Image (cartoon, rainbow, N blue to C red):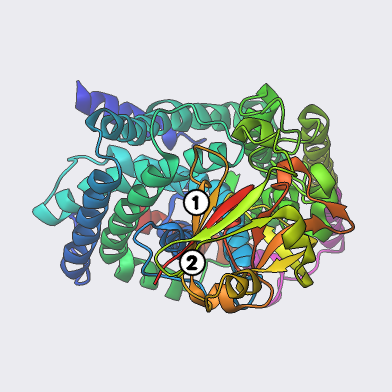
């Protein structure tokens, strides 16, 4: 019965008028071209995602340098843009190889069985990464697990399965790409070839859909294209004081901070004598202005002009040199409650305890009265509502 | 898709060893970062469920739509319509959450800040404008090609080395090669 069902599906996926050859869309060359594009896209996503994971990993052995200031913005913008552009590529590739799912007999050798076993984590993992990743940037999370942990672990599993698949198809792919393509027939001018879609039209359409997806979303980080960011979950110019926020003061329970009662504590094992600063004392320290991006792992970013006190100046006022720190927020929960600051970041003159955006005090949603802002840091580490700086030895 | 002997490429077993080692590391990381068994089960259910949803629902649906399209639409419109339908499906799939209001945070207007019904309509309008231009261009080229062929037939142009008939002959030879490769 299973065999009959497989035969039925095989024949239906190749149904075509008599005398018309099988579509070139199902051949090795089309699969190879899409496979190469997907391999490149997955490599970009994996490396940029791994970078972000290592930066945010609590183990803390990996630190991004503070320069170039916009590196994290580029890598995470690239991560999300590439992931979104991969959706049409993956769908086209799966469509191209779909009949192979019904190969009979399903397993012809041990190697063939191993190769096919790796397809479940490859296809399921790829779909999982793209479907949950897309929903995550819209903050729609209809699941009961940590997105970050699941995304990270599944990416390793998927990449492992991809390596198996590449090993199984490398020679075939190289041969398919080395062979000259069949000569273009006259009927290719309308995008068809002998009763089916031509390869050129199919691949061109796939590339065009990927391009359109990019055009409609990348404006969330590439500001000049924000007017076309019709499908993007963010706009870099929409939010309090023209900057998006992930967590509002109300959501964090920090909407009613009394500036007169506010105190910043500098303590920890690296501080001989703990020091407390009022807001007025911070305002009295030398002020510095820096134009820096705030960049989210979810792919959006925005540039603002921040003013405040250099972190290293605050530490110096407390009697310590630039050292590794942990910055603590007044918010009680969430991954952005604390953030590490490596001594290299502390020493950077643009790492600020910001008090203002442009000419205005920080909006409560941006961390009033004091937030951390530094070059080349993930947004989740740009701690808002800073209450304490714990200095390590 | 059946009958041919499976040939194991020389790169397979080294890649399989490396690939399964990487997958093993991923499974270890899953256990490390998701210690709760129920949550791990939920993740695995999503992975397997999405695979099955693609293979048993989405892909057959696309095949059925493709077959239906061939029956009701003239050949020269297949390519542009395939593009239009593909782009529409992807645009709607990506915009699904904001269109439905999923994930919106009431006190945070910077998340999903747009009227996505309006912007998605604009995106789809652009897609179908492109589709319409493609169809019109194809039709114009086909008319031009027919006129050119009719003109050549009327003038009884002798077959030359670069004539259209030789081009068709090359195409047919390509078909024969393709048939041999596939069957």
Mark 2 or mark 1: which is in front?
2
Residue B131 makes an appearance in the image: yes
Q: Residue at x 74, y 39 (%)?
A: B110
Discs 2 and 1 carry the same chain letter? yes
Q: Tell me the element at label 2.
A: loop
Q: Quadrant of the C terminus of chain A?
A: bottom left
Q: Residue at x 72, y 41 (%)?
A: A365
Cα separation, mark 2 vs mark 1, equals 22 Å
B46, above or below A191, in the image? above
Q: Residue at x 26, y 30 (%)?
A: B41
Q: Camera-side residue: A35 or B112?
A: B112
Q: Where is residue A48 shown, x and y percent of the image?
A: 49, 63
Q: Camera-side residue: A269 or A191?
A: A269
Q: Which mark is residue B169?
A: none
- Number of residues whose C-alpha sits closer than 10 Å to that of mark 1, classed few (under 14), some (14–19) or many (20 or more): many
Q: For mark 2, what is the residue?
A: A273
A193, above or below B11, in the image? above
Q: Is residue B143 magenta?
A: yes
Q: For mark 1, what is the residue?
A: A338
Main SS of the magenta segment?
A: helix
A324, above or below B154, in the image? below
Quarter of the view holding residue B21: bottom left
């Amino acid at each position: 019965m299973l065999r009959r069902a497989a035969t039925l599906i095989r024949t239906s996926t190749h149904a075509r008028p008599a005398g018309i050859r099988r579509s070139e869309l199902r051949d090795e060359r089309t699969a190879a071209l899409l496979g190469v594009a997907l391999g490149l896209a997955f490599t970009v996503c994996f490396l940029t995602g791994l970078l972000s994971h290592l930066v945010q990993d609590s183990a803390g052995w990996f630190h991004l340098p503070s320069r170039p200031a916009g590196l994290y913005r580029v890598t995470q913008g690239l991560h999300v843009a590439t992931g979104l552009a991969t959706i049409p590529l993956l769908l086209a590739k799966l469509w191209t190889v779909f009949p192979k799912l019904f190969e009979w007999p399903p397993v012809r050798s041990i190697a063939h069985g191993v190769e096919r076993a790796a397809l479940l984590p490859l296809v399921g993992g790829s779909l999982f990464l793209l479907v949950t990743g897309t929903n995550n940037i819209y903050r729609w999370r209809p699941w009961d697990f940590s997105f970050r942990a699941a995304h990270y672990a599944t990416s390793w599993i998927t990449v492992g399965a991809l390596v198996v698949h590449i090993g199984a198809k490398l020679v075939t792919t190289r041969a398919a790409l080395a062979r000259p393509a069949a000569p273009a027939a006259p009927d290719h001018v309308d995008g068809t070839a002998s009763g089916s879609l031509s390869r050129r039209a199919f691949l061109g359409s796939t590339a065009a859909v990927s391009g359109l997806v990019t055009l409609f979303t990348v404006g969330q980080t590439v500001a000049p294209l924000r007017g076309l960011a019709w499908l993007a979950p963010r706009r870099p110019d929409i939010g309090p004081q023209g900057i998006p926020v992930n967590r509002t003061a109300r959501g964090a329970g920090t909407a009613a901070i009394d500036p007169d009662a506010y105190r910043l504590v500098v303590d920890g094992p690296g501080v001989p004598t703990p020091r407390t600063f009022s807001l007025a004392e911070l305002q009295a320290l030398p002020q510095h202005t820096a134009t820096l991006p705030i960049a989210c792992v979810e792919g959006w970013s925005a540039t603002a002009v921040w003013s405040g006190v250099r972190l290293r100046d605050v530490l110096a006022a407390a009697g310590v040199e630039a050292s590794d720190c942990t910055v603590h927020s007044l918010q009680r929960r969430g991954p952005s409650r604390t953030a590490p600051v490596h001594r290299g970041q502390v020493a950077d003159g643009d790492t600020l305890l910001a008090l203002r955006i442009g000419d205005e005090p920080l909006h409560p949603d941006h961390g009033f009265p004091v937030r951390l802002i530094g070059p080349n840091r993930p947004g989740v580490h740009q701690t808002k509502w800073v209450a304490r700086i714990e200095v390590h030895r | 898709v059946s009958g041919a002997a499976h040939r194991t490429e020389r790169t397979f077993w080294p890649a399989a060893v490396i690939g399964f080692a990487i997958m093993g590391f991923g499974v270890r990381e899953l256990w490390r970062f998701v210690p709760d068994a129920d949550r791990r089960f939920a993740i695995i259910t999503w992975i397997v469920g999405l695979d099955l949803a693609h293979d048993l629902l989405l892909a057959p649906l696309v095949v059925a739509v493709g077959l239906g399209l061939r029956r009701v639409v003239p050949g020269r419109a297949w390519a542009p319509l395939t593009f239009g339908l593909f782009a529409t499906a992807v645009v709607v799939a990506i915009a699904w959450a904001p269109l439905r209001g999923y994930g919106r945070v009431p006190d945070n207007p910077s998340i999903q800040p747009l009227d996505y019904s309006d912007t998605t309509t604009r995106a789809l309008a652009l897609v179908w404008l492109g589709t319409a231009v493609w169809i019109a261009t194809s039709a114009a080229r086909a008319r031009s090609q027919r006129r050119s062929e009719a003109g050549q037939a009327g003038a009884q142009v002798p077959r030359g080395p670069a004539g259209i008939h030789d081009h068709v002959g090359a195409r047919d030879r390509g078909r024969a090669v393709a048939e041999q490769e596939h069957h």
